[in-house]
Image (spheres, rainbow, N blue to C red):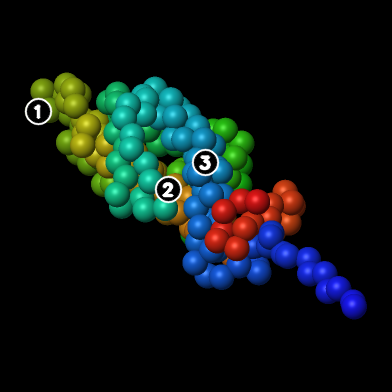
């Protein structure tokens, strides 16, 4: 009498899993969060420091930036001095306002995203009116050309928002089926039928 032997399959590649099991596998792969999150945070810290300020508080969900918040502590700046410091952050295409990839803050691509957001917001500020520079006695007005603290915060928030949107898109891409398959193959990850790591 012949015997039949069956090999019971106990582990599966990601692309062999059911949709529900794939979601569980993604949850496991996502346990450490967004893989570029530290680099993005370094960009925010470096941008604030470039303008002699600091990132003072944050709560960030890279998958959902609208549920996130960041706060900065920034000094006062004149329009001209802020423009000068901004120009030190690299060249940009005058037609698009986008940086040319200098990545002057940390050397990572997120630098350009944050700087692009800051540059666009700064371009929308009114240039100080030269006729209001001096009072009727010919003395220079003390606060002429100063950017208000509210505007400085808005500039930094614009930088954050542009960075956050880029990170969100990258985060979503990181967990697309195509990238998850590539990550699993590169690292030899296999799963039980329910999506738990084997």
* Horizontal relation, residue 147 to residue 52: left or right: left
Q: Disc 3 or disc 2, which is closer to the eye? A: 3
At 37% from the left and 41% from the top, the residue drawn is 60
Neighbor class of circle 1 (other Cα within 10 Å; few <14, some 14-19, many 20+) is few
Task: Give residue 36's quadrant in the image.
Answer: top right
Q: Decide if residue 6 is in sight here.
A: yes
Q: Residue 158: x, y in percent?
A: 34, 46
Split into 4 quadrants, where in the image is the N terminus? Answer: bottom right
Local SS, label 2: loop
At 36% from the left and 24% from the top, the residue drawn is 53
At 29% from the left and 33% from the top, the residue drawn is 71
* Horizontal relation, residue 77 to residue 8: left or right: left
- Whether label 3 touches label 2, CB < 8 Å: no
Task: Give residue 52's quadrant in the image.
Answer: top left
In the picture of the structure, the residue carrying the numbered disc 1 is 136
In the picture of the structure, the residue carrying the numbered disc 2 is 62
Give the spatial CA distance, label 3 vs label 2: 12 Å
In the picture of the structure, the residue carrying the numbered disc 3 is 32
Residue 10 vs residue 128, the one in the foreground: 10
Q: How many numbered discs, if any? A: 3
Give the spatial CA distance, label 1 vs label 2: 52 Å
Q: Residue 40: x, y in percent?
A: 49, 39
- Whether label 1 touches label 3, CB < 8 Å: no
- Whether label 1 touches label 2, CB < 8 Å: no
Local SS, label 3: loop
**Which label's residue is closer to the chain start, 3 or 2?**
3
């Amino acid at each position: 009498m012949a015997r039949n032997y069956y090999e019971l399959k106990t582990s599966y590649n990601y692309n062999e899993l059911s949709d529900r099991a794939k979601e569980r596998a993604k949850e496991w792969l996502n346990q450490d969060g967004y893989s570029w999150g530290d680099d993005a945070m370094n960009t925010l810290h470096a941008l604030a420091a470039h303008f002699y300020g600091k990132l003072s508080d944050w709560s960030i969900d890279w998958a959902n930036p609208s549920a996130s918040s960041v706060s900065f502590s920034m000094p006062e700046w004149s329009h001209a001095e802020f423009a000068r410091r901004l120009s030190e952050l690299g060249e940009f295409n005058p037609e698009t306002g986008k940086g040319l990839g200098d990545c002057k803050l940390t050397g990572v691509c997120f630098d350009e995203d944050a700087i692009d957001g800051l540059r666009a917001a700064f371009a929308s500020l009114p240039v100080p009116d030269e006729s209001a520079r001096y009072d009727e006695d010919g003395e220079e007005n003390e606060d002429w050309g100063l950017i208000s603290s509210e505007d400085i915060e808005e500039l930094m928030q614009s930088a954050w928002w542009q960075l956050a949107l880029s990170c969100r898109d990258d985060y979503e891409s990181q967990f697309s089926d195509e990238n998850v398959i590539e990550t699993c193959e590169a690292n030899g990850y296999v799963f039980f039928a329910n999506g738990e790591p084997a």
